Every structure is written in structure tokens, then in C-alpha cells.
Image (cartoon, rainbow, N blue to C red):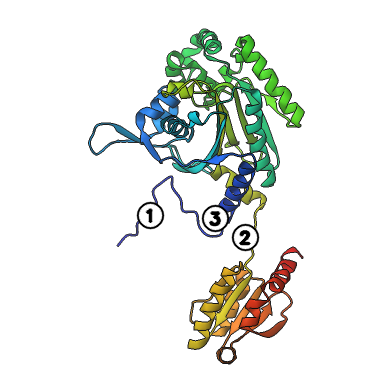
Amino acid sequence: MESIQALRGTRDILPGEIEYWQKVEAIGRDILSKANYQEIRTPIFEQTELFKRGIGEATDVVGKEMYSFDSRSKDYSITLRPEGTAGVVRAFIQNNLYAQGGVQRLWYTGGMFRYERPQAGRQRQFHQIGVEVLGSADPRADVEVIAIATDILQILGLKNLNLDINSVGNVEDRQHYRQALVDYFTPYKDELDPDSQDRLTRNPLRILDSKVERTQKIALDAPSILKYLGAYSQQHFDKVQQLLTDLGISYRVNPRLVRGLDYYTHTAFEIVSDDLGAQATVCGGGRYDGLVAQLGGAETPAVGWAIGLERLIILLQQLQVSTPPILDFYLVSKGDEAEAQALILAQKLRQSGFSVELDLSGSGFKKQFARADRSGAIACLIIGDEEAASQSVKLKWMASKEQSAIIQAELLTNTDDLRRQINAVKTA
């Protein structure tokens, strides 16, 4: 019988790789909690209308990439979430989080789904960690989220990172700019790729986002949105730049940066890596002051970002920034009584805060010792018939090969001393 394979565009995250994911999640959680960001978890599927209204029907995400299907009752359409912001905003409105007053700092992590051509760092089921700050129009909020993303990436050990920023203005600014783009691109209409020809009438800003080489060349001389910013938008963008400079965060102004979703206003930004080739964006985000009202809530300014974990993990693996966790003990045993005692000892050591792998193979000592060598454990604990009879255990330090016998009860009593010895080896 033919075996069942994972669907195209999905992949298994196996032991050996999962440590990278755990490290990213742990560092992200630590940094975000220090800034008082609260975790939120939303469903992986929502009503399709949420994304149509939130992201924009003229975007590639809504028009081409969503996984949508009818509800069982056929009363409405359901979509696997293609991004995280719209769901968080829906939860913010539905659960009256705005009633708590002040600024809401939220973060999330989880799987997203888009129908795309799978390639390195891009899957049809992919994962993000993201933040949303709701209730502040202050440019400091824009810079705070950028600074937090920078901290996460730098603490993970990433280098060769560049921050690109732009302002896409407010609704009025974009109306003026939209007409300027239509005027510019119309004479080139026949030379544009089919998607860009369609965007010319529906959403000309998306043409600047095209990955088609000929369209990119035409867009090089397109007018810059920075020339169409109103006084407020310009003031906001100037303040963001000044605050980034004050924090010592270097950046490049990229007037072609518009991001791929319609809800952005004012600040748009990307953090890109020179080590990722064509798929360079590690983190992307910006301000979206109109989205909450657009989805039925009160006028609420907001800003956020998302980091694509698949691309980030590729970078970490390339740079070998993460190492597998070190196991404290590998416990081998042989004989009925020895194996029973080993199970109890392993559990008590775990309850005392040690990491312990108990060999469950039932094979001879030689094979168990070979697995202990491969495990990377700091020490090996050995219980055979002799040790079982005396309620003792042999403690073998894997690096020095030093070995001693100790009564099991004493081992469990002197855990502080044992922990100091383990930590001394880890930090050596």
C-alpha cells in the first residue's frame, strides 16, 4: 500500500530542527513580556468577509492566495487565516478590549495559510510571530515595535540586517498619489504584466510591489509617494525617523516600499537580510489606523509587524546560531529490578529540575552506552543488578570519564551540589 505523504507546501518540523523554533519562541516571549505585550490566540479560520474587508479584495492575498470554503450550512464562507492582524482586530472589537482603556499591546504566534508556489522559506502553511499595538497614534509606538523586532533578531544572533522604511500617508494622500500613478503607468499599460494591468484600475500602488522584471524597470521612474504626503503625514514620518536616529537604529528610506496589504497607513517598514537571497524580508509591518473602524469598531489607531518564522529559521541554521539543549543525564539500566529503580530515579530527578533521558530499549549495556555517548548528556547514570541490590547508582561524567558510586537517596538529597557540578560543565 502506498504511504500517505504530507501535502505540497507543508512540511514536518522534526527533532533537531525544532530547537531553533523553540529558541525563537522563548526569546520572543521573553522580550515581549518585558515590554508588557500580552499574548492573544485567535482561531486559524475566520469568516472570509473579515479578510476581504480587512486586507482588500484587490490584493493578491484575497484574490489568489486564500484557502476558502463554504460552511456546512452554506450560509457563509470560511477562510484559513492568511495573516494574523485581521483576526486580532476582530477579537479586539468582539471582546471589547478597547473598553479597558489605554493602549493594548498584543502579540501572537501560529500557522497561516496561503496558496503560493512553495520554495525555500515560503510554504502554503507557514508560521509567524507578530505584534499589534492598538490605541496609539504616537510615532513612538511605530518606533517601539520596530525596536522590539530589532532586539529579537539581534539577540537571536542575526547580522547583515537592514531596516527599510516608508510612509504611505493617509487616505487623502493616497488618493492624490493614486491618480499620479495612473497617469504615469497608463502610457506603459501594454508593457505591464497582466496582474499590473488589472491593478492599474483597481489598486495602482500594488504595481510598485510587482516581482515581474519588466514592470519593475518601468516602476523605477514612477513618482514617489513622499512627494504627495500632507503636512500631518510628513510630520509623523519625520518624527519616526528622528526617534529611530535617537535610538541608534539605522534605516533606509525606500519610497517604493508599499507592503502587500491595503490596510496600511503612514509608516510601512521591512527588516531584510542580505543572507536570504531573493526572499530577503524577515519582518514586515506598519501602521493601520483605519482597520479597526473598517471592521466595525471605533476609530482606533494601530501599528504592528509579523516575522516569518520559516525564513528566520533558515537564517539561524545557516549561521548556526542555535545549538541543541544539553541533556543533564542519560540513564541506562539492565535487569528487572534495575529497570524499575531507573524509572523511579529518572522521574525524581526530573521533578528536581534536571533533564533526564531514560533508555527504554531493553538492550545490553554496550548499546545503551553507545546511545549515551550520542545523546550529548553531561553524565551517565548506570543501574545494574549490583546497584539495584544496594539501592545505588554509578555516576559517570562523560567528558572526563570519571566514575563513582553513590546511594540513590543521597543523590536525590544532594541535588544542589549535583546542580552546581552540572552547571560547571555546561559553562566550561
Q: Amino acid at mark 3?
A: Ile
In the displayed structure, 375 sits above or below 125; it is below
Q: Which residue is mark 1?
A: 5
Q: Looking at the picture, tell me which residue is in the foreground, 240 or 203.
A: 240
Task: Specify few, some or many for label 2: CA neighbours under 10 Å numbering under 14, 14-19, or 20 or more.
Answer: few
Name which residue lies at 41% across and 29% down.
Answer: 51
Q: Quadrant of the C terminus?
A: bottom right
Q: Amino acid at mark 1?
A: Gln
In the displayed structure, 271 sits above or below 17; it is above
Badge 1 marks a residue whose secondary structure is loop
Q: Quadrant of the N terminus?
A: bottom left
Q: Which residue is mark 3?
A: 18
Badge 3 marks a residue whose secondary structure is helix
Answer with mark 1 or mark 2, whichever residue precedes in sequence. 1
Badge 2 marks a residue whose secondary structure is loop
Q: Looking at the picture, tell me which residue is in the foreground, 165 or 292.
A: 292
Q: Position of residue 153 (x, y in %)?
A: 65, 42
Q: Position of residue 40 (x, y in %)?
A: 49, 40
Task: Specify few, some or many for label 3: CA neighbours under 10 Å numbering under 14, 14-19, or 20 or more.
Answer: few
Q: Looking at the picture, tell me which residue is in the foreground, 290 or 228.
A: 290
Q: Nearer the viewer, mark 1 or mark 2?
A: 2
Residue 324 falls in image quadrant: bottom right
Q: Nearer the viewer, mark 1 or mark 3?
A: 3
How far apart in space, not on screen, are marks 1 and 3 (Cα)?
Answer: 20 Å
